[in-house]
Amino acid sequence: MRPYAVIGAGPSGLAAVRRLSEKGIEVVGFEAHSSVGGLWDIESPTSTMYETAHLISSKTTTQFDDFPMSDDVAVYPKHSELKRYFEDYAAHFDVSSKFHFNSWVERVEPLEDHWRLTYRRENELHELDVEGVIIASGTLHHPKRLDLKGDFSGERLHSSDYRYPEQFDGKRVLIVGCGNSGCDIAVDAVHRARSVDMSVRRGYYFLPKFVMGKPTDTLGGLIKLPAKIKQWVDGMLVRLISGKPSQFGLPDPDYKMYESHPVINSMFLHHIGHGDLTVRPSIDHASGNTVYFSDGTEADYDLILEATGYVLDYPFIDKAYLNWSSMAPDLYLNMFTPNSDRLFVVGMVEAAGLGWQPRDQQARIIASFIAGRRAGDESATDLWNEVKTGDYPSLNAGLNYLELERMSFYVNKQAYISALNAAEKALGDC
Ligand SMILES: Cc1cc2nc3c(=O)[nH]c(=O)nc-3n(C[C@H](O)[C@H](O)[C@H](O)COP(=O)(O)OP(=O)(O)OC[C@H]3O[C@@H](n4cnc5c(N)ncnc54)[C@H](O)[C@@H]3O)c2cc1C
């Protein structure tokens, strides 16, 4: 029997290799970098990490349940701590030995009854024929650039290229975008730059990292509420804790809590309140060093930092195989494509406080499904028949997500975990 291929040695790929191996399925991993850890390894050529980055979700919410971080790790660990965590994970579950490192997957294509993977290593192309492929190459590697009208003569940098605060030294900085990365980076910039402005187009819900001495994302799950009621209750709580964004000169959200990803940052509003950061509206155009804003104001900048997010892309495979629909593949449980029972995605999922555990559960389900298909098991056939219908259960718990790139594969955490639990139960002992 041919092996399965896993693309990527981040949390998703490590879990996939581990879970397939545990089922006795031969597996070969491919990783562009020389080591494990995914984007948490700042040395990786594909990493979009910066020197001051820490987890935005807390460690207990984020870690793999059966591989907890040690007690001496901070509640919100630094990226280097997470790299170490994944190295320990890979060693503990004997995952690294299954990977080809420094190997870029360039092409994945189906042949008659199997898949062919083409990868580049030391400038040479190699091919491997495999039974199937698990894509775990991450969702935050292809920057969405700012569509800036005019001719800005200063420096432009996407957040994916930002590495350390010294890059701001003495500069007049405009940060565009107020998501978690934009806010984190703005907090870095205020300590180094000559001035820091932020262009904010829409409203966000802001939460600090700690409430009552506890990590904020550990409080939400204490009382189980239906999604719509939780949305209302948490929206009120956020207002109580952080006030209205307009009190800080920011736009108020014109949508409900959880219809977009909230910002978790204890320092961002603090710095606005201390006059370290000036809020600007959306950009109209630029000319020379001057940026003209939609409210008629203008200011001069040396650097525009584009914290404008990422586009989802799996450049090594034809979109048709992944059942793409507008901004993201339309996959059963965000994992299974109706176009092949030997092609899967792990890690194409996001939700408030989701962490890595559901990615491990995805990997377990895929491993059981593969084992079940090989054995001709009825429950795996039933699941495959469900995948082929293209009629997938809603994973948003009735919330109306904004039509944004990053929300195109967003789920409601409780709804998603319930759906994963149901799929895993249905597969039984596969
Ligand atoms: C600054 C920042 C802060 C974040 N904070 C949090 C947080 O607090 N909580 C949270 O849950 N998530 C956070 N994330 C999201 C992060 O994406 C996930 O935590 C996690 O890393 C996703 O794991 P992954 O394995 O799916 O993808 P990745 O970690 O992106 O790993 C994918 C791997 O695939 C490899 N790869 C890609 N293409 C190829 C190819 N063609 N050939 C071979 N290898 C390839 C890459 O080199 C990489 O190693 C953050 C992200 C960033 C950038």
Image (spheres, rainbow, N blue to C red):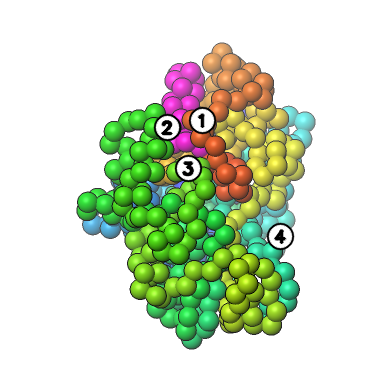
Dot 2, crowdedness within 10 Å: few (<14), some or many (≥20)?
Answer: some
Q: Are marks 3 and 1 in contact (CB under 8 Å)?
A: no
Q: Which mark is residue 124?
A: 4
Q: Secondary structure at mark 3?
A: loop
Where on the picture, by quarter, is residue 132? top right
According to the picture, the residue beneath numbered tag 3 turns out to be: 256
Disc 1 residue type? Gly
Residue at (64%, 23%) from the top-left corner?
391
Disc 2 residue type? Ala
> Residue 407 appears at what percent x and percent y?
56, 44
Quarter of the picture containing the N terminus is top right
Mark 3 to mark 4 CA distance (whole Å): 51 Å
According to the picture, the residue beneath numbered tag 2 turns out to be: 227
**Disc 2 residue lies near ligand 1 with CB under 8 A:** no
According to the picture, the residue beneath numbered tag 1 turns out to be: 398
Q: Secondary structure at mark 1?
A: loop
